[in-house]
């Protein structure tokens, strides 16, 4: 009898990692979840403690692991070389959750909007590609689940107050990123690839709120505010200063130069990427 190789999923309590754990488990692949605290997983998924900020803490989680799904939780690449080094001592393959921004030419430190967000992804990709590990770098556009940040406001007021009502993005379902990740972890078809992964169409922020409203069964509305007010609200909500400084100019730039839309999810998984409306239906309970 051959033993199936074990896959370690980091960010396992998060949006994409959680979906990767669920999919691997459902497919009968032995899966281990890296956790920092208590977490619930389906029976059969082994949770092992470890912290990506402390490479020495990762040894137990990596013991006997063949491939790693890596979600980098920091806004800088400090410590990443040591983490990739320790992964390389145990595993054969790493699938990294990067960002579409890397492929834009952002992240190169030349001051383009979005650089602060993507610079660390570019550095992680570089470290992984030169590590000797087998690798895939997934480059998704914005996550549909970012709109969960509107949930409290929508529940209490029925209105989202944010800048750029007309900003249209091909937001992607976390389950579609996870489906591609599973393919990269369990087959050889994406070795050395950096697929750009997008949702199926451009949807404005105003339309996103309306689609969430349809999913929850009550009218919800987007009310546009000035970027300066939005920055103040983000700071008050505790967003890191570098994120506030990067996100709003990056969004304004996307208004003039919308992100591309592609069919990579369907080409890779055989199933079309889900629309924002489908995402909203899947997450309606989070907005009720
Ligand atoms: N949001 C977007 O639009 C977008 C677009 C492209 C790329 N990305 C990238 O996607 C990644 C985030 O993915 P996500 O949204 O699925 O994550 P998420 O839902 O925000 O969850 C973060 C995960 O990281 C874990 N974590 C935090 N600090 C950790 C540490 N020190 N050691 C180990 N694990 C730690 C958390 O575990 P705990 O339960 O222990 O906190 C949690 O499982 C980021 O790298 C981001 O740059 C995001």
Image (cartoon, rainbow, N blue to C red):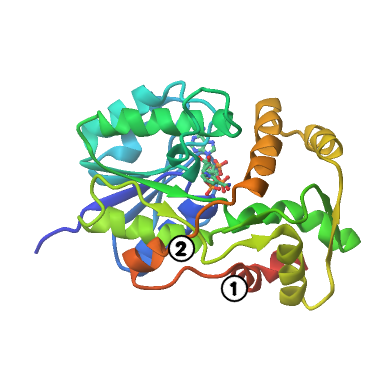
Image height check: is 172 above or below 212? Answer: above
The quadrant holding residue 126 is top left
The mark that comes first in sequence, 1 or 2, is 2
- Mark 2 CB in 8 Å range of ligand 1? no
Q: Quadrant of the C terminus?
A: bottom right
The reply to whether the residue tagged 1 has its Cβ within 8 angstroms of ligand 1 is no
Asked if residue 51 shows in the view, the reply is no
Q: What element carries label 1?
A: helix
Is 218 positioned to the left or the right of 207 in the image? right
Q: Position of residue 167 (x, y in %)?
A: 70, 53
Q: Mark 2 points at which residue?
A: 176
Quarter that holds the N terminus: bottom left
| Residue 278: numbered disc | 1
Asked whether residue 144 appears in the rendered view, the answer is yes
**CB under 8 Å between discs 1 and 2:** no
Disc 2, SS: helix
Q: How crowded is mark 2: few (under 14 residues within 10 Å), some or many (20 or more)?
A: many
| Furthest-left residue in this view | 1
At 21% across and 53% down in the image, what residue appears? Answer: 5
* Residue in the picture at 59% in, 51% down: 258
The residue shown at (19%, 32%) is 132
Query: Is 108 left, or right, of 194 in this rendering?
Result: right
Image quadrant in which you'd find residue 242:
top right
Which one is nearer the viewer's eye here, 230 or 52? 230
């Amino acid at each position: 009898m051959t033993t199936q190789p074990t896959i370690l999923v980091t960010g396992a309590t998060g949006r994409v990692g959680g979906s990767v754990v669920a999919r691997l488990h459902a497919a009968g692949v032995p899966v281990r979840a890296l956790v920092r605290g208590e977490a619930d997983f389906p029976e059969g998924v082994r949770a092992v403690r470890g912290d990506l900020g402390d490479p020495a803490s990762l040894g137990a989680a990596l013991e006997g692991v063949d491939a790693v799904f890596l979600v980098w939780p920091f806004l800088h690449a400090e410590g990443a070389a040591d983490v990739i080094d320790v992964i390389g001592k145990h595993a054969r393959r790493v699938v990294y959750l990067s960002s579409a921004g890397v492929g834009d030419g952002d992240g190169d430190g030349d001051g383009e909007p979005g650089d602060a967000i993507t610079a660390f992804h570019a550095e992680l990709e570089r470290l992984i590609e030169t590590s000797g590990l087998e690798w895939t770098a997934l480059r998704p556009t914005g996550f549909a689940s970012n709109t969960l940040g509107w949930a409290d406001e929508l529940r209490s007021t029925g209105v989202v107050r944010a800048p750029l009502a007309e900003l249209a993005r091909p937001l992607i379902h976390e389950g579609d990123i996870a489906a591609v990740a599973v393919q990269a972890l369990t087959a050889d078809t994406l070795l050395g690839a950096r697929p750009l992964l997008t949702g199926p169409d451009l949807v404005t922020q105003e339309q996103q709120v309306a689609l969430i409203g349809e999913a929850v069964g009550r009218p919800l509305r987007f009310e546009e505010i000035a970027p300066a007010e939005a920055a103040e609200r983000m700071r008050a909500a505790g967003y890191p200063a570098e994120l506030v400084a990067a996100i709003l100019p990056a969004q304004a730039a996307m208004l003039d130069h919308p992100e591309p839309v592609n069919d990579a999810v369907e080409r890779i998984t055989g199933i079309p990427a889900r629309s924002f409306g489908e995402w909203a239906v899947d997450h309606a309970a989070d907005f009720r």
